[in-house]
Image: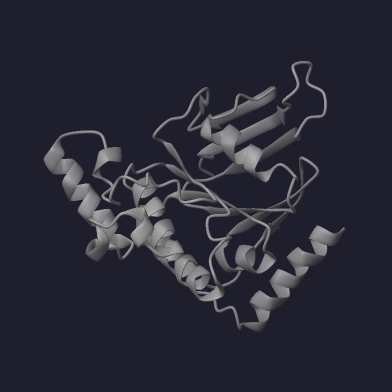
Amino acid sequence: MTQPLLTVSNLTKSFHPDGRNPVLKDLSFTAHKGRFLCILGPSGCGKTTLLKTIAGFLPPTGGTVEVAGRPVTRPGPDRCMVFQEDALFPWLTINVAFAIPGKKKRRLELARFHLHAVGLSHAATHLPHQLSGGMKQRAALARALALSPQILLMDEPFGSLDTQAKAQMQKLLLTLWAQLAQTILFVTHDPTEAATLADKVLIMGNGRIEKTMEINLQRPRNRKDVELFRKANELEEELKV
């Protein structure tokens, strides 16, 4: 078997100088290249802290995070994060070229490609206040993908969208994932969303991974499918334990 792209080993994170009351507690898992993992758990269980530690925004109190065998010590272009909020600058258009390193011609080519990929070619000169919630999340996704990260970290990015927009964004994300073969870690508290998206679900509770569940359902998946409904119920029952 190939080596994991991401290895999280005995990870602990506390915000106290003396290490008291850790938010993450001796947490370990791996993720291979091209896999889609959902991190499922209730609010306050440490999901966002885990993602920020993997991103390099937070230093671990104990344990390690490695990407391709190299320790994570700071943020880097191999790991890009899409937040709950769109994080768009209100004074800039959604053109993603500014976030891409390199020469101007290449930056513009990549920007056009990724705006087209998320269906926003027509809105490249729009300001954020001119965009719907779903369009803002598409723009945030385009900016992250434009850096060609090995790992895409997504922190409940569709949580504020209505049901229809959420389903559209899930479908778009799965299409892009199939094309780009990036590793995705997607935080959610919605068992149906986890069953719809993931290859594997890490169920978190109180700073730990309580259980890991493989989602061996054929793709593309339909929310009305009985097997998906059953898997979502299994996940929901695990959250109640």
Q: Residue at x 64, y 38 (%)?
A: 50
When the figure is inspected, residue 138 is found, relative to residue 105, above or below; the finding is below
Q: Residue at x 67, y 63 (%)?
A: 190
User: Residue 162: where, in percent of width, then height?
Assistant: 54, 71
Q: How is the image coloured?
A: one colour
Q: Position of residue 41 (x, y in %)?
A: 72, 53
Residue 169, position as x, y percentages in the image: 46, 66
Asked whether 75 or 16 is in front, the reply is: 16
Instruction: Please tell me which residue is depicted at 55% across the width and 73% down the height of the picture.
Output: 218
Residue 40, by quadrant, is: bottom right
Q: Quadrant of the C terminus?
A: bottom right
Pick out the residue farthest to the right: 241
Q: Nearer the viewer, residue 138 or 71?
A: 138
Specify the farthest residue to the top.
18
In the rendered view, does 42 fall on the left or right side of 67? right
Q: Image quadrant for the N terminus? A: top right
Q: Is residue 223 left or right of residue 131?
A: right
Looking at the image, which is closer to me, 167 or 208? 167
Write down the quadrant of residue 124 in the picture.
bottom left
Q: Position of residue 7 (x, y in %)?
A: 59, 35
Name which residue lies at 51% across and 76% down. Answer: 164
Q: How many marks?
A: 0
Q: Residue furthest left?
A: 105
The correct choice, above or below, for 28 with respect to 193 in the image is above
**201 above or below 21?**
below
In the picture shown, does residue 182 fall above or below 239?
above
